[in-house]
Amino acid sequence: MNAKTKDKIATVVFYLITLIIVATLLGLLGVILTNGIQVIDWEFVTEGPGSILTGGGGVGPQLFNSFYLLILTMIITIPLGLGGGIYMAEYAKPSRMTQVLRTSIEVLSSLPSIVVGLFGLLVFVQYTGWGYSLAAGALALTVFNLPLMVRIVEQSLSAVPREQKEAALALGITHWQTILRVLLPAALPGIVTGTILAAGRVFGEAAALMFTAGMTTPMIDFTDWDPTSPFSPLNPFRPASTLAVHIWKTNAEGLAVDAQDIMAGSAALLVIAVLIFNLGARWLGRLIQTRLTSSSK
Amino acid sequence: MSEKIVVRDFNLYYGEKQALIDNNLIIERNKVTALIGPSGCGKSTFLRSINRMNDLIPGVRTSGTIEIDGQNIYGEEQDLVLLRKNVGMVFQQPNPFPLSIYDNIAYGPRIHGFNDKKKLDEIVETTLKQANLWEEVKDRLHTSALGLSGGQQQRLVIARVLAVQPDVILMDEPASALDPIATERLEELIDYLKKSYTIVIVTHNMQQAARVSDMTAFYLNGEIIEYTETNLLFTNPSDQRTEDYISGRFG
């Protein structure tokens, strides 16, 4: 077989692999969306679950919980992730200690989420005495989201051309100012894109939340916005089932007459949300890039 | 003749490898000094020693002194930020920040404490005029600097350096990424700038060294082989190795 034939075979093989990936994605999206989209209406998105005997109702509180939990997690992970990423990219000297740190971060991010959930149950639920709560869920999600954030920030900072950093330092700008005013702005599109993609992962997480944020949502009153009130949707110490956990629970217990519909609709909602995250990430990254490079008069 | 930079017995090591060997050199005020030599001879390393950019590379050690206006910049009390403010640097690749033209120039002054809009406008205009770029960009000051051509970017970078008011400007092969016309404009600019600044330029291009510089140092394997007036070095080199290099026998 000559080199030309091999080259042709290789090309065909790679095209086939690409085709398989795209076909899998389209097939998955097609099934989930066609099954789910007919269930989704305004009531399904806003109302609470209906009676298990008559069916109906929706997943409004679960959808809210998913977003709220995401926000709580991000409030914890973004500052810590920025700090860790800046340290790893700019301050950590190549040494054994840094090597250990890097390995630790990698191991932390690859822990099975059910294990993180059990750890969360012990520490964030029982040891703190909070019980199943949004706060415990957010901390559990932080455990594997934080390493991801650190890596995103570190990689975005390291991807800034060395010339940029040297240009700043050569102007007599201090290291900290260089980080703050040159490196971070240049890395921002990457950080934002990475963060939103990480958010998509958090949004769809179920296993780590079953034993931390809990599998039920108490009666909540969407007119009560006082975070200390037990009925407020904002109270971080109330239990909260997210959309992903709700799917799992509906499937596992399956008592509702319209369990199939609830699952299909929730799955479609979840997928739509994650798709929006992904597309939004690209769009926002580009927007920031153009904004940064021009100035107001 | 007045001494701006005095280098005495300067050695630099990258870990075990010695990159600069016993460099001795006197660089004069308001002159253009060219550093020439084959790739890897240490000329860029030496240039980056004058504003201590080599400090960024792990494992670099030095001995000997480099004095600027009589002060040893490798002394313990040397403030690196102040040193780099006084010794500006232009790199091989034009490296404007991904900001507007205006913000690129206002960058240094802003960080060093200028916030007055009028004053900043003035700095931007003067330095762009000095860098011979004003006419080309005055109507698009607030658009991205990345939209400029390579030659314009390099002049913008020079304006950015001028805006922090250095008195020495180091140039590391500033024309190597530019076309002949942009190179010519850059050389004119260097000639104009030496009235007010001391310029040290590393170049691969011997014609360029001959055109722009007053003094030339020839580097080989980390050593300064010959250092003298440019026209003397190119017409009547005293060392055989210099002659071999400038006549194109190696390098």
Image (tube, rainbow, N blue to C red):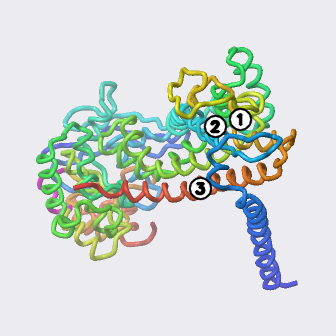
Counting residues from the N terminus, which is met first, the one under dot 3 or under dot 1?
1
The amino acid marked with disc number 1 is Ser
Magenta range is B190-197
Residue identified by numbered label 1: A241
Q: Do marks 3 and 2 share a chain? A: yes
Dot 2 amino acid type: Asn
Please rate how many residues cluster around mark 1, counting C-alpha atoms within 10 Å: few if below 14, some from 14 to 19, many from 20.
Answer: many
Q: Are marks 2 and 1 in contact (CB under 8 Å)?
A: yes
- Mark positioned earlier in the residue sequence (2 or 1): 2
Q: Which comes before the other along the chain, label 3 or label 2?
A: 2
Nearer to us in this view, A209 or A254 = A254
- Identify the amino acid type marked 3: Ile
Q: Secondary structure at mark 1?
A: loop
Please give left or right for residue B221 compared with residue A11 in the image. left
Is residue A207 visible to the viewer in this orientation of the structure?
yes
Q: In x, y percent, where is residue A209?
A: 73, 33
State which quadrant residue B173 falls in.
bottom left
Q: Chain of mark 3?
A: A
Q: Residue at x 27, y 76 (%)?
A: B181
Q: Depth check: A201 or B180 in front?
A: A201
As measured in the structure, the alpha-carbon distance from the residue carrying label 3 to the one carrying label 1 is: 21 Å
Instruction: Please name the residue shown 26% across and 55% down the image.
Output: A296
- Residue A104 in the image, given as x and y percentages of width and height: 70, 32
- State which chain disc 1 sits on: A
From this view, report whether residue B176 is shown above or below residue A165: below
Reading the image, the residue beneath label 3 is A276
